[in-house]
Image (cartoon, rainbow, N blue to C red):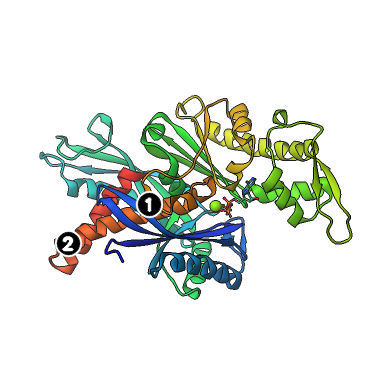
Amino acid sequence: MTSEPIVAALDIGTAYTTALVAAVHGDVPRAPRLKVLGVGHTRTMGLRRGMVSDIEEATRSIRAAVEEATHLAGVAADGLFVGIAGEHVRAMTSSGVVAISGHEITRPDVERVNEVARAMAIPQDRELLHAIPQEYRVDKVDGIRDPVGMIGTRLETEMYLVTIGSSPAMNLRKAIERAGYRTRELVLEPLASALAVLTEEEKELGVVLVELGAGTTDLAVFHEGKIRHLGTIPFGGNTVTSDLVQGLGITQHDAEQIKDAYGCAYEPLIDPQQVIAMPASGAHGERHISRELMTHIIHQRMDEIFEKAQREVHQAGFTGRLNGGVVLTGGGASLEGIRELAADVFGLGVRIGVPGAKLDGLVENVTQPQFATAVGLALYGAHREALGGVVARKGGRPGASVDKLASRVKTWLQDFF
Ligand SMILES: Nc1ncnc2c1ncn2[C@@H]1O[C@H](COP(=O)(O)OP(=O)(O)OP(=O)(O)O)[C@@H](O)[C@H]1O
Ligand SMILES: [Mg+2]
């Protein structure tokens, strides 16, 4: 057994639930690495477009995935780092100003200004999920990453605030509790995926992460190292499956099967003569499906999804500013031809985001784009755990450690999204 801290992550997607148990090691707390000990992957029941729609069913999916992961890992999962997403997510920027009275700017000054920016009135039916300081301005100088030690009279900050609907969050926590686990923290899914697959250089140059899930397609735009825009498009892999059901006259089950096995999102890549033999089932004998028709259907829908994503990036003001290109994650990123189609629509370089950096252990179990969220949640947890360890080792009065943890954590969020 290991004495390294253990983190457990849970990504409850519309189609699949993934649990991941890992040990934290490496250069703690600066650059922790994850040793993957166990992964659980199961079909999700009881979710619609990323939100819990049936608590009983969601509870069962959670239990199945976490039990599989902890069984494989041979360790128990205590608190879980859990992903949340959906159309209820909102983001906004908020600013704060404080006066500095003729001394060098200190860490407490920075925390003070962050508090001011963070203290936005949040409506009753919403919760604040993340408050991410973006940059500071000292008197007339802006674009400052860390103002500590600078001289000035006026310190200003821009904060990126992410809020979520209270009821989707409560239903999620409730399902986890019923499954017998504790929610350690909720984390926005596309931000978790970004932690797992984006490089610092991409975030600096400007990059859009497009997560092709089953229920939704989520976007996260980074520029000059910081998260700048989040968006959700209410279409995903399930929409493509429904299109195939309609267009090919086959069952949902068959549509999903042939999509995952033979799906292609880019018509120029396929041989128009090719047919796919579908095994006889129920009332039907063996059937042949034109791969050209199938590809046409997928291409049309994915093209529409990317068009919407691109429009959103444009409206957010990032057209022409994404020199880091496009990174695709989620199950849909495994579709043949998806990179080619995205490159056509965005007119940018596109790569598939596969987790792997900062990982050891059962790495091959998670090196697919659909595991980006779960890996990112665990990496997030590793940083939290690493910071917690530092505070705990420093000891002192319990109150003091909590304060220190709180301030370290704020610093950390600033460094990571
Ligand atoms: N090899 C593949 N080819 C095509 N599609 C695939 C492949 N593997 C998975 N998918 C599709 O990806 C989707 C599942 O992706 P993912 O696991 O990222 O979604 P999710 O996290 O459950 O959903 P969401 O994030 O929207 O709540 C399904 O629609 C599935 O059909
Ligand atoms: Mg997902």
Q: Dot 1: few (<14), some (14–19), or many (≥20) neighbours within 10 Å?
A: many
Image position, residue 334 (x, y; %)? 59, 43
Using the image as rendered, state which of residue 312 and residue 198 is in the foreground: 198
As drawn, 322 above or below 281: above
What amino acid type should be assigned to the residue bearing mark 2? Arg
144 and 235: which is toward the camera: 235
Q: Residue at image x 49%, y 36%?
A: 208
From the top left corner, tell me how far across and down residue 341 is, in percent.
Answer: 63, 32
Among numbered discs 1 and 2, the one appearing first in the sequence:
1
Residue type at mark 1 is: Leu
Identify which residue, 263 or 287, lies in the foreground.
Answer: 287
Task: Report x, y in % for residue 43.
Answer: 61, 61
- At 49% from the left and 69% from the top, the residue drawn is 67
Q: Image quadrant of residue 194?
A: top left
Image height of 3 relative to 136, above or below:
below
The residue that disc 1 covers is: 379
Rendering coords of residue 255 (x, y %): 75, 51
Q: Which quarter of the rendered picture does the C terminus lie within?
A: top left
Q: Which residue is mark 2?
A: 393
Q: Which mark is residue 184?
A: none
Classify residue 74 as left or right of residue 16: left
Crowding near pointer 2: few (<14 within 10 Å), some, many (20+)?
Answer: few
